Image (spheres, rainbow, N blue to C red):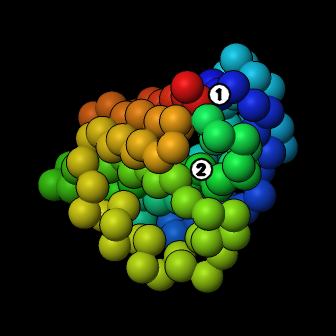
Amino acid sequence: MATGDTLRKVDNHDWYGYIGSAPYPDEIGNGQWAAFHHVHRAGEPSGSVGAVVYRGKNGEGEQKDYLVAWSTPWGMWYRNKAYCEIGAVNCYQNLWAGMYNRVANSDYSSSARSNGCEIDARIETGDSPKFTAKITVR
């Protein structure tokens, strides 16, 4: 992820799976990238489905929440999904049930734009895909 402002982690949600050996970074500096490892539970046919929310300023200097989410379901008959949104501060706190449906109905890529900010999220195919999200402020 990259942006014109430091991003600070404010929330995350696991529908299936959990954060692995590399946790979500608490902060991502301007122009920096970060990585985390989200995995499915051993022995469970449920895959990895989760989301993380970071907060930072948009192009107009206002604080916004940036949500990025992914779905790597268990089984070759399901497709991986990437999803992203830009919203007001704290707008995702109690919306996780409905957010799951948005992620499940997404595709291999997703983008969001709002007031000088953009998110581009993508996920690869396969059972251990790389998920990438780039957050840009213009």
- Whether 17 is drawn above or below 30: the answer is below
Task: Residue at 47%, 46% (x, y): give it.
Answer: 114
Label 1 sits on a secondary structure element that is loop
Disc sitting over residue 66 in the figure: 2
Q: Residues within 10 Å of mark 1 (few under 14, many from 20)?
A: many
- The numbered mark at residue 3 is 1
Q: Give the image location of residue 111, x and y in percent.
A: 36, 41
N-term-proximal mark, 1 vs 2: 1
- Horizontal side, residue 114 vs residue 30: left or right: left
- What is the residue that sits farthest to the front in this orientation? 60
* Residue farthest along the left direction in this orientation: 77
Q: Secondary structure at mark 2?
A: strand
Q: Position of residue 107 (x, y in %)?
A: 24, 48
In which quadrant will I find the N terminus?
top right
> Which image quadrant is residue 57 in?
top right
Categorize mark 2 by other alpha carbons within 10 Å: few (<14), some (14-19), many (20+): many
* Among the 4 quarters of the image, the one containing residue 65: bottom right
- Against 32, residue 92 (above or below) is below
Q: Residue 112, relative to residue 120: is it above or below?
A: below
Q: Are marks 1 and 2 in contact (CB under 8 Å)?
A: yes
